[in-house]
Image: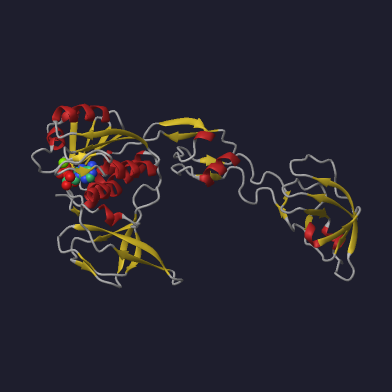
Amino acid sequence: MITYQEALEKIADACELLPVEEIPLRQSHRETLAEDVFLLEDLPLFDNSAMDGYVLRASDIRHASEKKPVILVCQGVIGAGEASQLSVGAGTCLKIMTGALIPPDGDSVVPVEKTLSEANRVAFGEPAEPGDCIRRRGEEMKAGERLVEKGNLIDSVVWGLLATANKASVPVYQKPKVALLVTGDELVEPGEPMKPGSIRNSNGFSMLGALRELGVETIDLGVGRDDRADLEKRLEEGSRADVLITVGGVSAGDFDHIRDLLAEGFLGFKESFYKVQIRPGKPVRFGTMGKTLVFGLPGNPVSCLVGFHLFVKPALRKMWGFREWENPVYRAILEEDIHSPAPVLNFWRGKVSPKGGSGEWRVVPKQKAGSGMLTTFLDANCFVPVPIEKDRLVRGDTVDVIPLGGF
Ligand code: AMP
Ligand code: MG
């Protein structure tokens, strides 16, 4: 049986970047940027006012004080976006709006709140320094500098920066298409009548939801019955996706036909590994059908989600061109003991939160850990892995935590 790290390496090796396509900026939110974006012009593009106020020559109000304000005559107004012909003459000022171009000979802006005005006469009760309230051309970044790195998710901030950089269209990696097949004769949809031994199909929801939360394109292959012909048909459809996830039917059961089909190399399936030294989720199968990555996850409601977070999610990020595709690992202080005698890497669910003002993080592990108990994921926001060589973690230990959220 291979280790968790070995499994991750095998998966990473099998991941190929998805093709790049150029799409309109408007449609690119939550896609992955496929090239570095450089600024062609300085940012900001021109000296502009940081405030609504008056632009003047600082030397003109050098002696201003509350007792002896300096009065300047205001000779006009400059709005944002206006290509004004006005300039600041000695002993005068211009009213100026936030973002407006600084006119020639003006060297500072005094916010309107710091002035008193009557008709076109404006009183200044304190001096100003050259440069006050002016945003200088290029002060944020210079033309030629790299604005956003390839492999960034186009989140709200990146989206805004791409607009700033005048990218009307952007190259992105194609969105992964992920097919999901849940299997089992015992599965019954919500609302449908149950028979003795039936169980509700929860994985069809939890797994589809997990995929949707990543923003990938999902193909729901429905519920496959423990019947070869039915499964063959659904697998065939799934093999056209970039990633095919099957849930259930991969273990040692008599009716685990997915296992048999994969073992026989159905649709050219090439197995990379089967079984990883982890709990829950040990009987996970991974391989490829042509260019399609195939994850055969066990059917227990916790096991398949564990497989999803540990293996499927990093693979999807890598294919999708994410610069940071591996699951991050943080550290937190454990609040309750965890017992984990089996020699496996055991992924407990937990809830990590800041430890009131101390700058440290604390993690409360779920006390139940059964692989069939989906409730152990409820309110959980991380895994707490118990290393193979340890049979317990103790309250007060500083432990690894792997956050579940965030993509
Ligand atoms: P399997 O991997 O098919 O042997 O399934 C392992 C366990 O998970 C069994 O108890 C199944 O009933 C349960 N299971 C499989 N698929 C689902 C599903 N879609 N929803 C809820 N439980 C499931
Ligand atoms: Mg089954």
Residue 124 sits above or below residue 285 on the image: below
> In the drawing, does residue 12 fall left or right of residue 20?
left
Residue 403: x and y in percent read 35, 56
* Residue toward you, 246 or 164: 246
Name the residue at 33% across, 57% down: 382
Residue drawn at point x = 85 percent, y = 69 percent: 66
Residue 339 position within the rendered picture, expressed as x and y whole percent measured from the top left:
20, 66
Q: Residue at x 77, y 61 (%)?
A: 129
Residue beneath the point at 52% across and 40% down: 37
Which residue is farthest front?
Answer: 193
Residue 109 screen position, x and y as percent = 78, 55
Asked if residue 333 is positioned above or below residue 1 in the image, the reply reads below
Q: Nearer the viewer, residue 192 or 99?
A: 192
Locate residue 92 relative to residue 166 in the image: left or right. right
Let me know if residue 232 appears in the view.
yes
Q: Is residue 391 left or right of residue 313?
A: left
| x, y percent for residue 152 | 45, 44
Q: Ligand 1 quadrant?
A: top left
In the rendered structure, the answer to whether residue 127 lies left or right of residue 350 reads right
